[in-house]
Image (cartoon, grey):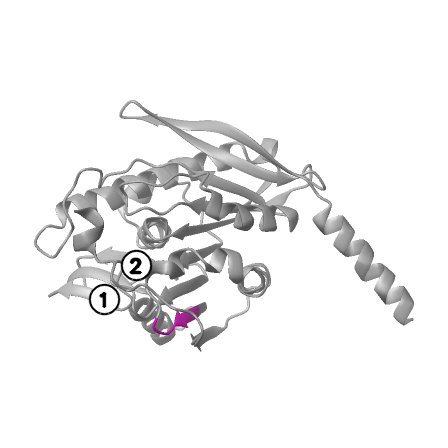
Amino acid sequence: MKIFLSVVLFFLTVVLFGQTVQKETRLFAEKEGQALKMDIYKSDMGSSQTQPCLLFVFGGGFKDGGRDAELYHSYFHYFAKKGFTVVSIDYRLGMKDQKAPGVFNNKPIRNAIAIAVEDLYSATNYLLENAAELHIDPSLIIISGSSAGAITVLQGDYESRDNRPAADVLPDNFRYAGVISFAGAIFSNEGVPSYTQPPAPTLFFHGSADKLVPYDKTRFFKLGMFGSKSLAKKFRSEKYPYMFYSIEGIGHEVSEYPMQEYLPEIERFISDWVLNRQQWMTDIDFKDMLRKSDTSTTPGNYYN
């Protein structure tokens, strides 16, 4: 029996890691003279079967970055080999050549978030319109993002659930199936965001020492950026399903390294919260005593 199980495990390992991931690039929109493209990653095994879609939005402070950055490849390939269609998209960068955002200088960042969300919705519509050809299950589109991309996906799900005008471009019956945020936040002028409809099950990763994207919140009266801690607290009070990895003492690096080091945990969230629709609220306080962090990055030195 032990020999049989060993053979099965060996076979599965060979099958999984022997797969080839193929990438196709498509144009999904043209805006303000800019061609917006998406990279579509699929495994060569089962790529003709209908699959859930993991849509990714890259980070870079809304001023730089790219959909095909090397640091994201392990994330893309892992989930393509697990039976997902992985899509990484462009969006317009509204903070290029802008000064650091703040309470009294919030118009540029508000605009940057708005156009990024608009482009996320355009990419989503493209996937929905071409779902049959791409073999995507339109009811299983999960959005994920890093840093500025995490802000974009959290904001995108929030505005679609709160019936904001920007979300009118999406089909009336469409809802994102899940949200994965690597160091994200939501911009709100109403205080801690309140959802008219329950949000998608959400996985938050955030470092407690993050000074670039607020771990908790930065606010002036009701206006501000509300990070993972304040959003998870809101989710718990409203009984919305979520999972929150609070990484103690680490800065903005949490926007990147979970995509290499927490892949099984991300897969578990998708399986339990999204696919199996578990109604769980989970907070994980995690401390890695061997990991050192650079917590010096702030909006002031990042944008100037």
Q: CA distance from mark 1 to mark 2?
A: 8 Å
Residue 64 found in image quarter: top left
Please give the name of the residue rendered at 55% of the width and 69% of the height, measured from the top-left corner: 278
**Residue 53 location (% of width, % of height):** 54, 45
Number of residues whose C-alpha sits closer than 10 Å to that of mark 2, classed few (under 14), some (14–19) or many (20 or more) = many
**Residue 60 location (% of width, % of height):** 32, 46
Comes first in the chain, label 1 or label 2: 2
Please give the name of the residue rendered at 38% of the width and 41% of the height, measured from the top-left corner: 120
As shown in the figure, which amino acid type bears the numbered disc 1? Lys
In the displayed structure, 150 sits above or below 121; it is below
84, 280: nearer the viewer? 84
Q: Is residue 282 magenta?
A: no
Q: Secondary structure at mark 2?
A: strand
Q: Is residue 81 visible?
A: yes
Residue 212 found in image quarter: bottom left
Residue range of the region highlighted in magenta in the rendering: 244-249
- Residue behind mark 2: 185
- Residue behind mark 1: 217
Labels 1 & 2 near each other (Cβ < 8 A): yes
Q: Is residue 245 magenta?
A: yes
Please give the name of the residue rendered at 58% of the width and 65% of the height, measured from the top-left corner: 272
Q: Is residue 121 left or right of residue 3?
A: left
